[in-house]
Amino acid sequence: MALPPLYYAQQLRSELGLSGPADMLEVASKLGIGVFEEPLDADGYLLRKGEDNRILINERLGYEGRKSFTIAHEIGHFYMPHHQARMYRCLGRDIEAYTRNNQMENEANEFAAEFLLPSRELDKFLKHPPNLDTIREVSGTYGTSLTATAVKLVQLTCEKIAVVLSEAGEIKWVSRSQAFPYWIPRRQLHEWTYAYDYFVKGTLPPGPQKVLAAAWCEGMSRDAEIVEESVGFERLGIVLTLLYVPVGEDELDV
């Protein structure tokens, strides 16, 4: 029976004597894997042929954080013993997607998130409920994308928080903390959300804002509120949203 991806990521960090941020090109080199940027029809490939192991990443990825995550994702395929295929072709929708549709790709994502953002080192950032400022701080420290960082912190926190990624006015995926008690369906964004305003007007208000919970969560009462904090990425055409249950309130009326 395979162990959880988190275990393999921690094991490899221990074998390499790593603490703090990881240089993924250096990690790949230590594992005997060459890394090459090329024009590809996917975000990344892992190719294995005898002793010749290669990772190819799409030269159009652009962001260094996304490149690092893609390399870590492919190393997850390489390192986890039950990932034995000679080739893995990983699309953008597989990497950092968190859709839970493909077990092998999800495991590689979980490996990459733990390898780049080790849980034991993030406790110091979780003394207060994580917000976008916290996410930016951790992202800057570890050289990871805001998306990967947000998901990791939401998974670790005991606060009632969810992270939502929207594209073209539609909710693509949701990751919730264990404490977050409400269901957020994949659907078109409600016009009462600030994320919707971004796709229509191209602007977002600074900082957290209260909105009607029913605009995000299914089955909520008309008067219940939730806190939304959104950031837009013009180049990628996406919005990343944090949703919080208001401080000092118990579960909202449903």
Image: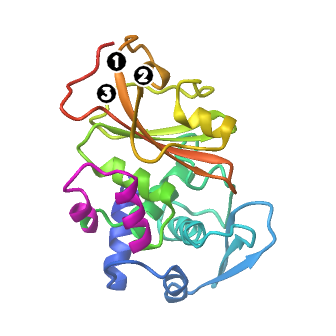
| Quadrant where the C terminus is found in the figure | top left
Specify the label residue 47 is tagged with. Answer: none
Determine the residue positioned at 58% across, 66% down: 66
Q: What residue type is labelled 1?
A: Ala
Disc 2: which residue: 212
Foreground mark, 2 or 3, reads 2
Residue 124 colored magenta? yes
Q: What whole-number distance in Å separates the C-alpha atoms at marks 2 and 3?
A: 16 Å
Report the front residue among 183 and 207.
207
Q: Give the mark nearest the N terminus, 1 or 2.
A: 2
Residue 240's spot in the image, x, y percent?
52, 46
Task: Determine whether the residue tagged by mark 2 lies in a helix, strand or loop.
Answer: strand
Q: Which of marks 2 and 3 is nearer the N terminus?
A: 3
Q: Which amino acid does label 3 sit on?
A: Pro
The prevailing secondary structure element of the residues shown in magenta is helix
User: Residue at the spot x=33%, y=40% of the render?
Assistant: 177
The residue under label 1 is 224
Residue 170's x, y, as percent? Answer: 64, 33
